[in-house]
Image (cartoon, rainbow, N blue to C red):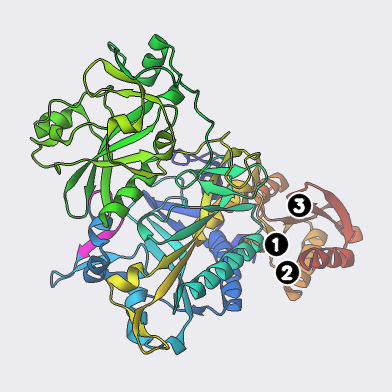
């Protein structure tokens, strides 16, 4: 390819719309063009990158016996209603674009394809003898992001690889899950990325277990917690840890009620009474809106020095109620006024707050869902609110409160906490960009969509399912976010739009032109992906463009062209060497065959 035919347009100034480096460089290098918020055109340079990533993905999945297909992007609402996801995906903060056809039938633009593939498999596969099956596609997905940002990182239209496996039993699912994890590790390694695999929350996809693959980058949206020995990693939503023990209260002191005027916060309570946050049970009141459109009040007990993890809370409520949580938020004084509730003493609530306070509620359910984090339940003696304004109870225990709570993990793990796998290891935090996610779905979708097969015992059973996604276009930008310098992009060779760029320093010099053309043809004949900068531009402009678009190797045909010598520059190491026409081909062939 010749630069004169590449439709290359580079920008010197940083576009105002771009907040992070990778977004800026993709725009400046002419890789993408913005059509409107969250919607981009993939220009020829980026399309070459995407095709190389795609080839790596396809080759690795084919090794695992996966079958490639292409599924409909328009999906009927009935399928999503059967799985129970239509409302959560199309209402409130749902991410599915929905529409009606001329007959008034509701459809959605596919953000994911669990429902579609489950129905197709249920119509096609009927016996355990036909299992397992692992089927994948690479296509455009659509998500109505509330706030599209960071270019291809969080766009409304993007390219994704999604795969779905179907099994006769759980053990076979787990085996394929491990195979797919291995495939993902191979894919991301071949793409030249530094990545980590971490435990993750399954979110709206659901399922028993899931892991995310993260490219580590300072600007990553996700906070990751990793053990210092590297043997444990999880995103913030899923991470677990061991917290420091509480500062013990005097077990000989008798339970009492004390006045705590205007001491609504943990900090105020500790400062006025010489308490420690680890001795206090903090009680939080939340309201959850679910698929059935009912509003459920929730009372949470957690140790005073710990923070609530909203995702864990939402998952626990969904599990208890066996339905999706559409919205969850803290209860406010305005909520109480609207509901006709006037006697919840915020700042002084105890775990045993009576359900009678909800008796006048107009819309809410009349009983609290009561949850206690392990950090609170493990306290033998503690301080808590007395359910009366300006009063707390001290030296109390759970027997005295006589309240029934479900104990679960609701707290945020944080850097510095000790690890379960080794108490001598501590969590440290970094930021990451999600590029892949694998799930063990179990029978969640097969049961809801009545997708069954006949087992070896002649019994109808639901399929066991797995789901495996890679953001192809997101991966391309993540590679840029991880591989750049002040001059521009530094593409890993395996996914670079071109492997080598040949720059003619003076296009008017016949010797330089002829030597550049000869080297270019030799590279092409040896299947080295080369780009010839044949523009009538100053050499400095060409060098800046080459650095900006990030081609891994640069051949400069300049002053020594008369003697058949050129310079070879490595974009990543900055090392420059001189070669003759024969030895440069040998050098590059060796580099690309390592």
- In space, the residues marked 3 and 2 are separated at their CA atoms by 21 Å
SS for tag 2? loop
For residue 528, the mark is: 2
Q: Main secondary structure of the magenta part?
A: loop
* First in sequence: mark 1 vs mark 2: 1
Q: Which badge, 1 or 3, is on the more N-terminal residue?
A: 1
Which x, y percent locates residue 435? 52, 56
Name the residue located 25 percent from the left edge and 32 percent from the top edge. Answer: 352
Which residue corresponds to mark 1? 499
Query: Which one is in front in this view, the residue at disc 1 or the one at disc 3?
Result: 1
| The quadrant where residue 64 appears | bottom right
Q: Is residue 351 visible?
A: no
- Residue 416 visible here: yes
Q: Given contact means CB atoms under 8 Å apart, are the residues at marks 1 and 3 in contact?
A: no
Q: Is residue 560 left or right of residue 204?
A: right
Q: CA distance from mark 1 to mark 2?
A: 7 Å
Residue 555 % position (x, y):
78, 57
- To which residue does mark 3 refer? 505
In magenta stretch: residue 94: yes
Measured along the vertical axis of the image, is residue 368 above or below residue 250? below
Residue 346 badge = none
Q: Picture coordinates of residue 497 (x, y %)? A: 62, 61
SS label for mark 1: loop
Asked if disc 1 and disc 2 are in contact, CB closer than 8 Å, the reply is yes
> Would you say residue 119 sits in the magenta stretch?
no
Nearest to the observer: residue 95 or residue 424: 424
- Give the extent of the magenta segment: 92-99
First along the sequence among labels 3 and 2: 3
Q: Looking at the image, which residue is at 31% across and 14% down?
A: 263
Q: Residues within 10 Å of mark 2 (few under 14, many from 20)?
A: some
Q: CA distance from mark 1 to mark 3?
A: 19 Å
Q: Nearer the viewer, residue 101 or 500?
A: 101
């Amino acid at each position: 390819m010749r630069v004169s035919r590449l439709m290359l347009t580079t920008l010197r100034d940083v576009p105002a719309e771009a907040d992070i480096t990778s977004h800026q460089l993709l725009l400046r290098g002419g890789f993408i063009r913005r059509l409107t918020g969250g919607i981009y055109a993939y220009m020829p340079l980026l399309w070459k990158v995407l095709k190389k990533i795609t080839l790596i993905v396809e080759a690795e999945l084919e090794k695992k016996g996966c079958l490639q297909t292409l599924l409909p992007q328009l999906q009927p609402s009935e399928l999503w209603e059967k799985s129970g996801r239509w409302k959560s995906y199309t209402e409130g903060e749902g991410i599915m674009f929905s529409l009606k056809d001329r007959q008034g039938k509701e459809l959605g633009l596919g953000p994911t394809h669990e429902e579609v593939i489950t129905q197709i498999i249920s119509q096609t596969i009927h016996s355990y003898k036909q299992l397992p099956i692992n089927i994948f596609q690479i296509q455009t997905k659509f998500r109505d992001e509330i706030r599209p940002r960071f270019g291809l990182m969080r766009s409304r239209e993007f390219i994704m690889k999604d795969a779905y496996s179907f099994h006769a039993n759980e053990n076979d699912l787990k085996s394929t899950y491990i195979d797919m994890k291995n495939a993902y590790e191979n894919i991301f390694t071949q793409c030249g990325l530094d990545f980590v695999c971490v435990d993750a929350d399954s979110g709206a996809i659901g399922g028993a277990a899931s892991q995310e693959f993260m490219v580590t980058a300072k600007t990553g949206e996700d906070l990751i917690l990793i053990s210092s020995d590297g043997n444990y990693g999880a995103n913030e939503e899923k991470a677990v840890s061991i917290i420091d023990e509480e500062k013990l209260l005097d077990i000989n002191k008798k339970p009492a009620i004390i006045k705590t005027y205007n001491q609504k916060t943990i900090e105020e309570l500790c400062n006025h009474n010489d308490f420690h946050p680890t001795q206090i049970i903090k009680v939080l009141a939340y309201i959850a809106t679910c698929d059935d459109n009912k509003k459920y009040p929730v009372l949470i007990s957690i140790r005073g020095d710990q923070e609530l993890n909203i995702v864990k809370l939402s998952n626990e409520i969904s599990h208890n109620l066996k339905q999706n949580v559409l919205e969850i938020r803290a209860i406010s004084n305005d909520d109480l006024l609207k509901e006709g509730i006037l006697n919840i003493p915020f700042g002084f609530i105890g775990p045993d707050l009576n359900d009678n306070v909800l008796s006048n509620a107009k819309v809410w359910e009349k009983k609290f869902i009561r949850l206690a984090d392990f950090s609170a339940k493990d306290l033998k003696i503690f301080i808590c609110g007395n359910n009366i304004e300006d009063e707390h109870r001290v030296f109390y225990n759970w027997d005295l409160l006589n309240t029934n709570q479900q104990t679960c993990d609701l707290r945020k793990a944080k850097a510095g906490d000790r690890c379960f796998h080794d108490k001598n290891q501590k969590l440290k935090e970094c930021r990451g960009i999600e590029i892949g996610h694998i799930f063990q779905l179990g029978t969640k979708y097969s049961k809801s969509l009545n997708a069954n097969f006949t087992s070896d015992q002649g019994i109808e059973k639901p399929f066991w399912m797995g789901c495996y996604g890679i953001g192809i276009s997101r991966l391309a930008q993540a590679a840029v976010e991880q591989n750049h310098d002040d001059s521009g992009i530094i593409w890993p060779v395996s996914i670079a739009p071109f492997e080598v760029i040949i720059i003619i320093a003076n296009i008017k010099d016949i010797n330089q032109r002829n030597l550049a053309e000869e080297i270019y043809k030799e590279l092409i004949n040896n299947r080295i992906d080369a780009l010839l900068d044949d523009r009538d531009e100053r050499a400095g402009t060409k060098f800046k463009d080459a650095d900006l678009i990030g081609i891994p190797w640069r051949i400069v045909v300049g002053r020594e062209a008369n003697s058949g010598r050129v310079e070879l520059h490595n974009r990543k190491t900055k090392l420059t060497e001189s070669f003759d026409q024969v030895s440069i081909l040998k050098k590059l062939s060796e580099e690309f065959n390592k």
